[in-house]
Image: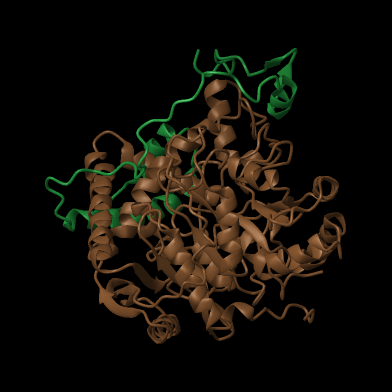
């Protein structure tokens, strides 16, 4: 059905982006992304030989400031936003897989 | 009280003359918001307690006669962080997030003793044009509650249009201030890239995002931009250029001003009523002494493709920070770290955000980077050149803001392509970093229609001058929606 992007490619891109697309959602996302990437293809009509890409339109070269901390000493407020915290640390699940699936 | 027939200067006068205190004004504003928002849903968070405390403080300090924002209630889009006050970007992933600092633009308003009454609804992470992508609620257009308010700053624009506040801040990455301003019959300015610090704006497309004011009239808008502009050491793209007084030339008229209408902006796909509103505005400008001629911006039709590649690529990078570790939603059934990232993000982000992240990841991925991201960045250069050429012969560009008036809730949401095409008239301004403002200029079947004024980089002054000249000779901005028999 698709020309620009396949279901496998969508799965791969989702993986790169740390997203999981359920199998039953895959055709829906693939059809939509395919249409949009089809639109992206129209850019190939434009002659861009020798044209410099623009990544930003800022007129600032660099901004320097004193290397001093501001707005600090808010450990409690910061930790209050963490989904799980204990004794001043943010808690995460163990990094080693404990599901046993990959052993 | 509602703000339908008011402006900053007349409310300010009441405050200065002590006919009302900021505290009482804020109380009345909040009670009106609580009532009106039953129908409109403009706010995600209404901060009664914080607002009243700030208003009290403003009264204690004394209303400054020279500062129109002193003690004045304002609303803030919910992607601008506010210390201690929940900031969600309308995403489930930030449902309970309380920032530990305040965005520079908001801080500048608060330094002038403006009173933040709450945080407005928006499309999740500002991705969308109808505010229907909010994870929390659907905002209704005050002119017709079956219609969308536009987006992504739909809550901000609707709150002003509904008379809930006189001033709201929005953000604009591809039209997110101007398009809802058009849909709601209010004034919305996207300033030049770099004019307003982006520090504390939850990032979407960092080379495109700008914060700007939404107000009932042009003079109020200029007053608010005066307040929030200027260099900020926290944002290295914020400009060190001097900030002029944007109200200083409001009454200078448009005699001799050269205005161009891009023919590509009046092409197929633009609603006939919208075209007529633009042509009528051109006639008004001619009568006021400006010249109006056609101009060409030949790469306009490639804008949507270039914009969605660039903005999605930047978004895919910016939204990597949402990982379920330090703040935000964390999945409850992850067995290891990898699963924690994937499940937290997959549960926390809505479909549109996922689509953008995937489009960006695809455009930047090995093998596709040159064909998509680099190509889009080159087309961006060509679009900038189009504007540079146009501004050799013209001082200002006049164009429709959006292809149509507000459409029905639920009409477009299922087809992202239709949504994306709606941005065709606003996103070139972001790609080129230019200032652009939408002002009320007519109606179509009872719904407001705006026109867009686009200026040279850092020339918001000419936009305000021309905007005010138009406003003074028309009464579109004075019309108000008829909501629930309230007025």
Note whether B159 is above or below B290 in the view shown. above
Residue at horizontal 54%, vertical 28%? B341
Note whether B329 is above or below B38 in the view shown. above
- Label tally: 0
Q: Quadrant of residue B301?
A: bottom left
Left or right: where B160 falls relative to A53 = right
- Camera-nearest residue between B63 and A74: B63
Q: How is the image coloured?
A: by chain
Q: Quadrant of residue B166?
A: bottom right
- Camera-nearest residue between B454 and B226: B226
For chain B, give the colour.
Answer: brown
Q: Which chain is green?
A: A
Left or right: where B254 falls relative to B88 = left
Q: Percent x, y for residue B309?
A: 34, 48
Note whether B118 is above or below B465 in the view shown. above
Query: Looking at the rendering, in which quadrant would you find the N terminus of chain B?
Result: bottom right
Residue B419 visible here: no
- Camera-nearest residue between B410 and B213: B213
Q: Percent x, y for residue A38?
A: 29, 56
Left or right: where B24 falls relative to B169 = right
Residue B89 visible here: yes
Q: Percent x, y for residue B233?
A: 50, 32
């Amino acid at each position: 059905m698709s020309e620009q992007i396949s279901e496998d490619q969508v799965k791969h891109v989702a993986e790169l982006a740390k997203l999981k697309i359920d199998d039953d959602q895959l055709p829906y996302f693939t059809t939509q992304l395919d249409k949009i990437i089809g639109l992206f293809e129209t850019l190939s009509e434009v002659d861009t030989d020798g044209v410099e890409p623009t990544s930003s339109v800022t007129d600032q070269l660099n901004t320097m400031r004193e290397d001093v901390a501001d707005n600090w000493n808010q450990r409690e407020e910061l930790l209050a936003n963490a989904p799980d915290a204990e004794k001043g640390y943010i808690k995460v699940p163990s990094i080693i897989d404990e599901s046993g699936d990959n052993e | 009280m509602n703000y339908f027939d008011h402006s900053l200067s007349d409310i300010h006068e009441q405050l200065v003359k002590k006919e009302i205190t900021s505290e009482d004004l804020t109380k009345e504003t909040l009670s009106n918001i609580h009532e009106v928002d039953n129908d409109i849903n403009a706010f995600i968070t209404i901060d009664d307690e914080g607002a009243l405390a700030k208003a009290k403080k403003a009264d204690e300090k004394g209303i400054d006669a020279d500062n129109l924002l002193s003690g004045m209630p304002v609303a803030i889009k919910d992607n601008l962080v506010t210390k201690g006050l929940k900031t969600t970007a309308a995403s489930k992933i930030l449902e309970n997030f309380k920032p530990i600092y305040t965005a520079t633009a908001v801080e500048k308003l608060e330094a002038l003793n403006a009173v933040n009454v709450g945080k407005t609804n928006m499309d999740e992470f500002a991705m969308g044009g109808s505010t229907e992508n909010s994870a929390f609620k659907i905002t209704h257009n005050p002119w017709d509650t079956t219609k969308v308010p536009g987006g992504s700053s739909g809550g901000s624009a609707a709150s002003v249009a509904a008379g809930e506040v006189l001033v709201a801040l929005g953000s604009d990455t591809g039209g997110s201030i101007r398009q809802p301003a058009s849909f709601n019959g209010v004034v919305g300015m996207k300033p030049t890239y770099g004019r307003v610090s982006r520090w504390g704006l939850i990032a979407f497309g960092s080379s495109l995002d700008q914060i700007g004011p939404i107000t009932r009239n042009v003079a109020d808008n200029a007053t608010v931009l005066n307040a929030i502009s200027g260099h900020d050491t926290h944002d290295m793209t914020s400009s060190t250029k001097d900030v002029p007084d944007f109200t200083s030339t409001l009454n200078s008229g448009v005699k001799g001003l050269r205005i161009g209408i891009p023919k590509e902006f009046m092409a197929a796909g633009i609603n006939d009523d919208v075209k007529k509103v633009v042509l009528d505005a051109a006639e008004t400008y001619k009568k006021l002494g400006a010249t109006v001629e056609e101009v060409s911006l030949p790469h306009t039709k490639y804008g949507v493709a270039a914009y969605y590649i660039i903005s999605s690529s930047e978004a895919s990078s910016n939204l990597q920070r949402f990982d379920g570790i330090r703040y935000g939603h964390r999945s409850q059934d992850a067995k290891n770290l990898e699963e924690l990232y994937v499940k937290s993000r997959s549960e926390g982000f809505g479909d549109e955000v996922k689509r953008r992240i995937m489009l960006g990841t695809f455009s930047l991925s090995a093998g596709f980077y040159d064909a998509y991201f680099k190509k889009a960045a080159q087309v961006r250069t060509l679009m900038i050149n189009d504007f540079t050429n146009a501004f050799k012969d013209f001082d200002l560009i006049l164009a429709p803001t959006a292809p149509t008036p507000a459409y029905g809730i639920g009409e477009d949401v299922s087809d992202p392509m239709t949504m994306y095409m709606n941005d065709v008239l606003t996103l070139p301004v972001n790609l080129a970093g230019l200032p652009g403002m939408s002002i009320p200029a007519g109606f179509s079947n009872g719904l407001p229609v705006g026109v867009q004024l686009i200026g040279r980089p850092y020339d918001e002054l000419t936009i305000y001058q021309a905007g005010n000249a138009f406003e003074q000779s028309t009464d579109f901005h004075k019309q108000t929606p008829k909501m629930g028999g309230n007025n």
